[in-house]
Amino acid sequence: MEKIRRVWQTTALRNNILFVVAMLVIFRIAAHIPVPGVNTENLRRFLEGNQILGLLNIFSGGTMENFSIVLMGVGPYITASIIFQLLTMVIPSLEELSKEGESGQQKINLYTRLATVPLSFLQAFGMIKLLSNAQYGIITDLSMFKLVSIMITVTAGTIFLMWIGELITERKVGNGVSLLIFAGIVASLPRMVQSALANYTSSDVYLYLVYLVLTIVTIVGVVVISEGQRNIPVNYAKQIRGNRTFGGAKTHLPLRLNMAGVIPIIFAISVILFPSMIAQFFVNGTGRSAQLAQWVVSVLSDTSAVYAILYFSLVVGFTYFYTAVIFHPQKMSENLQRQGAFIPGIRPGRETGEYLGKTMSRLLLPGSLFLGLIAVLPLIVRSFTGAQSLAIGGTSLLIVVSVAIETTKQIEAQLTMYEYDRV
């Protein structure tokens, strides 16, 4: 409560938080503005019977079941970000841009935004064709004009959310894209709780207890891997100027157990759901393509062991990948050397960079495995209990807790900065 009071008394920080809240409210209003000509009741019934699209609907905060103008959420933007982060590692020109600091990153961000437009248009076309082919009467009389109009509308909605996300990020009180996903999940939680209470029977007591324990374990696990860090001792060389001695201070360099935060989870979900979405287009067809599509849907269903193994592997892999993108041991070593700092027992320069890289790799192993285990823990529990909502609830909880921790830390950092300015 004391921190909340201090945050509220800091005018600039309070205004930033109120701005972020206002942007999230605008997002939720847009999520309830439906595109004309769609039978939303039939759409809801269709999503309830489709696990993959139902999961996407949960993460979009109900924008899909409302067929709103922000139907696809920030999914295409996340996909574009993944593509360019992969391309940065294989295309020399993009790799050079990434090394140019803030100016290079701004150019990569520009390319990501531009790539989001065609990806949104393509994904909108696929989603509309999928829903129009469903045997539920969701979209009827789909003329060319109506198809193009809906595609342009939902693409504009995605670009609008991308813009809102960047405005939020600029306020430095949380990652904009993560907060939009966070808001979408939180918005769906009251209805999920209401449904759980409405369907409650005395025979399900043990399932609810398991879910409660799983929730506590997930929260504790996410907090542990988010807060865990190794402190590398750093000494500053002494400097003599005249009769005075400067430097010689001792401090530490914190290396976090999980530097990537919630990004690996978001990336893993985006990647693992993509093949199933593509396969949905061919399920109702004939021949080998329909059989192959049905096989992909069944194998990547969230009830299969393949899904759990692949999900775990992707979370671990993306944790390493994203950390490699944001953590540069050689650059960190150069900065320490410029400041006259060194790690005891390690030579400055290349050896310091190698030491930091090896240390980070060792930290990432337990961190990534723990994060992957938390991600698939609800699936494992569900395989024994048969509770259908645990997988969605566990993944949602994982994202919500991680984003909440990340946002809280950024707010605390901003508060500390403003208090230093006052002094």
Image (cartoon, helix red, strand yellow):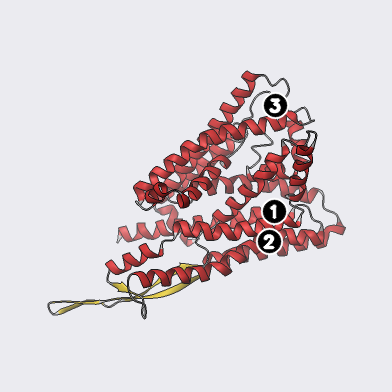
Residue kind at label 3, given as amino acid type: Val
Please indicate, yes or no, whether residue 41 appears anywhere in the rendered image: yes
Image location (x, y in percent) of residue 87: 48, 48
Task: Judge whether 220 appears above or below 119 on screen.
Answer: below
Left or right: residue 58 versus residue 210 is left
Q: Residue at x 58, y 69 (%)?
A: 366
The mark that comes first in sequence, 3 or 1, is: 3
The mark that comes first in sequence, 2 or 3, is: 3
Can you identify the residue that label 2 sits on?
Answer: 215
Q: Are marks 1 and 2 in contact (CB under 8 Å)?
A: yes
Task: Judge whether 74 appears above or below 37 on screen.
Answer: below
Residue kind at label 2, given as amino acid type: Thr
Can you identify the residue that label 1 sits on?
Answer: 393
Image location (x, y in percent) of residue 22: 50, 41
Separation of residues labelled 2 and 3 (CA atoms): 37 Å
Can you identify the residue that label 3 sits on?
Answer: 38
Task: Judge whether 109 appears above or below 413 on screen.
Answer: above
Residue kind at label 1, given as amino acid type: Gly
Q: Dot 3, crowdedness within 10 Å: few (<14), some or many (≥20)?
A: some
Rendering quarter of residue 404: bottom right
